[in-house]
Image (cartoon, grey):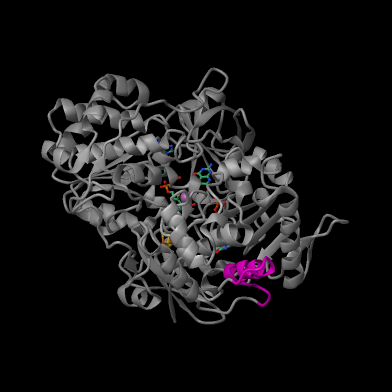
Amino acid sequence: MTRTHCPYCSLQCGMVLEGRRALEVQPWPEFPVNEGALCRKGWTATGLRGHRERLTTPLVRDRATGELRATGWDEALDLVAGRLRELQQRYGADAVGVFGGGGLTNEKAYQLGKLARVALGTSQVDYNGRWCMSSAASAANRAFGVDRGLPFPLADVEHTDVLVLVGSNLAETMPPAARHLDRLRENGGHVVVVDPRRTPTADRADTFLQPVPGTDLALALGVLHLLDSAGAVDEQYVAARTTGWPAVQRAVSAWWPERVERVTGIPSAEVRTLATRLAAAERVMVLTARGAEQHAQGTDTVLAWIDVALTLGMPGRRYAGYGCLTGQGNGQGGREHGQKADQLPGYRMIDDPAARAHVARVWGVDPETLPGQGRSAYELLDALGTDSGPKALLVFGSNIVVSAPNASHVAERLGALDLLVVADLVMSETAAIADVVLPVTQWAEETGTMTNLEGRVVLRQQAVEPPAGVRSDLEVMAGLAARLGHDFATDPEEVFAELGRASAGGRADYSAITYDRIREEHGVFWAGPRLFEERFAHEDGRARFVAVEHRGPAEPVDPAYPVHLTTGRVLAQYQSGAQTRRVRALPDDGPFVEIHPMLADRIGAYDGRPVVVTTRRGELKAPARVVDTIRPDTVFVPFHWVGANRLTNDALDPSSRMPEFKVCAAAVTA
Ligand SMILES: Nc1nc2c(c(=O)[nH]1)N[C@H]1C(S)=C(S)[C@@H](COP(=O)(O)OP(=O)(O)OC[C@H]3O[C@@H](n4cnc5c(=O)[nH]c(N)nc54)[C@H](O)[C@@H]3O)O[C@H]1N2
Ligand SMILES: Nc1nc2c(c(=O)[nH]1)N[C@H]1C(S)=C(S)[C@@H](COP(=O)(O)OP(=O)(O)OC[C@H]3O[C@@H](n4cnc5c(=O)[nH]c(N)nc54)[C@H](O)[C@@H]3O)O[C@H]1N2
Ligand code: SF4
Ligand SMILES: [Mo]
């Protein structure tokens, strides 16, 4: 019997794995986050074991036939290291790019950053977290001086009075968390859901607001305007704990409810009711997720909702405040330990001389040798194979071909590389086009830490031996590092201890956390379970109000592309689907287009029959799902299958560099 955690989302539900051969998932009722509950994906997570498409040997593309052929580890790693060195000699250190993932353990994320900065000396490292919660992260850093998705335990939700969920469908994206909504309502609390679709989460809400995609910012400005004009600002809190309110007050002065209605499509009376409800509540909690964040104005949108929470005096108060529901299994830790272009371990910034000196000491190198800030995820992909961009890319833990925005363009860039190396468990769409594929262990076969959406560091523990021929990511990285003249540890606990030293004194300090403590305490929160009770993380201890303006989607609808396209998730599939599409027990119906009956009527579409969605970047033919739960001016496509991202817009948020996955202009025909 092994206690571990689900391989998928940021809830990191505790589970017990039983048996050695036929591995079975059992509940772990004592683990507090999910109390023994799992969603379908968790119960079926062992479905990839022994799967015929599980990778078990390194593969190298044969120049003559163009096919991938099996090879030995030494041959594969020698080849990769040799080609990387060659390309760097020819074009410079930045000729090699590294792309990581928020599903990697802390140990792997840390080691990947070190591989890039120390063994390869490249600045070109970033990861898929840019596409996940980066807008919330940049907003929280700005407003609070630190970015921890939830600055309180998730279960605090049950004790607030009004919970506002902006762009989260947690009933499908973290189903065991939905119990907190139910308990909150049993406790007399009120749930508000803001989503262009009436989702299963909205079905559990007391208030459902259905905005035009990309307009959450205007709604927040409208709420701020009403709170101010009603005299509902917590003056004492604003004076004692914040700075910057007057500028926000000026910025929202013209956002009267009728203007909000024109922009968002939410009736002005509903905007007023929301503001009145928030003003009257003792405790208010605002949580954002990808619906509000994955926009070219995602950072500003989150800032505006943080402004709402600050106006009401909530952040730092028990059972209240603002939080972001991080998405990937290690979405939190993955952004703390240095696989991000601007970052060193411990959430240190790479352009901070003191941070460089500290980390360089732990790494035993001269700070001068550490590269500076590199390109963000999409900009990195966009530069591949160009004159100034990387000529080789190493991918660990992302299926870019499916999940990157404007995917046809990205596929073209990947095609322009001299060398694409992918480490994965299965033949993902990205592995399938690689020059070298390296087969790695999956969750039940390895040990390491993950940091869940609450900042709770949990321990993934090995339950079974990996298939013969498979290596851990840490072993793969050490193998490459050795060939480049560097000695990297492969034992996860040893890497974790090194990570602890590298993070010591940083914003996310793991130095006091050990595997044993995690085992004893059901996970350990870095910086404790609740932040901001006394002070915020800025030097003066105060939170910052930030005045922002609504700009609207980067690509507004027009007569040629009259419909808003938004994208997201369904319960039974995870992300690019590389893992869950291969789990037989999960339904794999392919992409579909959610469309309102009125729009269906207008274009002559029928439920179950194909429609074509076209944007300026591509088109997708998929069956229509005619449902009255979506706005008539909007269609929704899940992104778990190839196709959705051929449509999406690669416009980036100026501060987080988050692509606008959640809204672009589309045409739909039957
Ligand atoms: N089943 C499942 N669960 C998952 C994942 C998965 O792939 N599958 N992935 C995990 C990861 S990495 C993440 S990041 C999380 C994501 O978790 P969520 O953010 O809950 O998931 P999404 O479906 O991307 O988006 C949430 C909602 O945003 C709505 N939305 C779209 N546009 C807008 C808008 O402009 N404004 C507002 N207010 N809402 C909008 C969509 O209709 C959708 O219902 O889920 C995690 N859990
Ligand atoms: N249109 C649209 N696109 C989106 C989104 C959206 O809402 N709409 N959401 C975005 C978001 S929030 C996210 S997080 C991204 C996610 O998209 P991806 O980055 O593609 O995430 P995954 O599908 O989880 O990819 C993980 C890959 O790594 C492999 N893998 C899993 N574990 C490991 C490991 O430990 N080591 C290694 N080496 N490989 C491993 C898996 O088999 C899989 O192939 O998609 C983004 N793309
Ligand atoms: S909610 Fe997330 S962590 Fe929990 S079982 Fe489902 S996918 Fe796994
Ligand atoms: Mo994500």
- Read off the magenta span: 468-487
Image coordinates of residue 103 in percent, x first then y, are 50, 59
Which quadrant is the N terminus positioned in? bottom left
Image-based side of 534 in relation to 326, left or right: left
Image coordinates of residue 567 in percent, x first then y, are 50, 40
Q: Is residue 84 visible?
A: yes
Is 476 magenta? The answer is yes
- Above or below, 558 against 288 in this view is above
Q: Is residue 579 visible?
A: no
Q: Nearer the viewer, residue 105 or 9?
A: 105
For the point 69% across and 68% down, the residue is 483
Image coordinates of residue 78 in percent, x first then y, are 75, 67
Is 62 magenta? The answer is no
Q: Nearer the viewer, residue 269 or 662?
A: 662
For the point 47% across and 56% down, the residue is 356
Image coordinates of residue 226 in percent, x first then y, are 20, 27
Which quadrant is the C terminus positioned in? top right
Image-based side of 279 in relation to 17, left or right: left
Residue furthest toward the top? 559
Q: Nearer the viewer, residue 562 or 483?
A: 483
Residue furthest toward the right? 64
Q: Quadrant of residue 297?
A: top left
- Total tally of numbered discs in the picture: 0
For the point 30% across and 74% down, the residue is 521
Image-based side of 377 in relation to 435, left or right: left
